Image (spheres, rainbow, N blue to C red):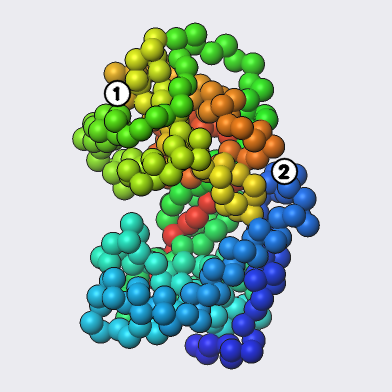
Amino acid sequence: MSQVSETARPTPEALALVTLQMQHPLTRRWLPDAERVPLLAEQHESDLELATSLEIARMRAAHFGFGHVQPEDYLDRWTAVKGGLYALLSIRFEGLDRDNPFVNLSGLWRPWTPADLPALARAAQTVYGAFRPKYLRLFSAEPIDAFAGLGRDRRFLAAPISDLAAVTTQLPPELTLRPTADASDLGQAEAAYAAVDAQHPAHAGQASVLDAEDLSNTIAEGGMFDVLVSGEWAGYAGARKSTELGLHAYEVQELLLAPAYRGRGYGPHLTTLLARALPQPERVLLGTVHADNRGARNAALRAGRLDVGGWAQLPV
């Protein structure tokens, strides 16, 4: 397995054009390609920085503390996979947990096909085998389980905010939003997640409550709201501006109902209320939901968000 020379490393724009080809056709109606490519290129600029910055590599090495690898081993690698296919590979860690390493497919010279999967798995193992990665994570706009042998991961659920806000379904009059003022109810949110985790152990690996820093930042941006039922705190609904998938988006930070308010059909209405509360309806509301988290995924779909693809896991 040979690594492409330094001069052959692609530009962010070249990677962005390939990433654009791999996006769901629906999303290409939401923002013109000419506007989307620069946003995707910004993302790939960060990927390529991880391929060259020894300073960042040393910081990662100090954080994860693997004694048998060198700092330069943390660099992203532009790698020759097979004839005509080159890939930008990156070592990552689920939840920044050193015991859960995986390889991310961060960029490609052309879109991958099922015939490429064995060679991609070998490339990931060859480049980052010292970390003992569990899988290679790659993006596809195809439906869940479209490819045999790939494990499930998070899916992107998205729709234009203007469409979500225009839903004509009757909203429960007792269900409202109020701008969140502080973190005083974060403990209740944490307890709500803990209750779901206790009832459904797999949930802990599929979703987690936002932390105090994320809550504070979302409040500061004006995108966090308390969910109220008859004036009583019942959960959170919030989102922050982002350019995920190369779209001008609000990325969902939290859509949460406390246990006492579940089972009343409120879930899908949170998306409608949030869409109406966010100040820039020309953006897309976008969030990730694990493919196995059927409750959250079904609520998002019922609210009008669309599954526009997601990550899958290729064992290595």
Query: Amino acid type of disc 2?
Result: Trp
Query: In the image, residue 194 lies at what x, y percent?
Result: 24, 35
- Residue plotted at (63% across, 25% down): 165
Query: In the image, residue 276 lies at what x, y percent?
Result: 59, 25
| Disc 2 crowd, CA 10 A, few/some/many (<14, 14-19, 20+) | some
Q: How many marks?
A: 2
| Disc 1 crowd, CA 10 A, few/some/many (<14, 14-19, 20+) | some
Q: Secondary structure at mark 1?
A: helix
- Ranked by sequence position, the earlier of labels 2 and 1 is 2
Of residues 190 and 218, which is closer to you in this image? 218
Check the image and report above or below for 33 versus 165. below
The image quarter in which residue 132 lies: bottom left
Query: Amino acid type of disc 1?
Result: Pro
Of residues 159 and 315, which is closer to you in this image? 159
Q: What is the C-alpha distance between the residues marked 2 and 1?
A: 35 Å
- Residue 259: mark in rendering: 1
Which residue carries the number 2 mark? 30
- Residue plotted at (57% across, 83% down): 80
Figure quadrant of the C terminus: bottom left
The image quarter in which residue 39 lies: bottom right
- Residue plotted at (60% across, 78% down): 86
- Residue plotted at (66% across, 22% down): 166
Left or right position of 170 against 94: right
Check the image and report above or below for 140 versus 181. below
- Residue 151 visible from this viewpoint: yes
Query: In the image, residue 65 lies at what x, y percent?
Result: 25, 75
Query: In the image, residue 164 lies at what x, y percent?
Result: 62, 28
Check the image and report above or below for 269 versus 94. above
Of residues 204 and 221, which is closer to you in this image? 221
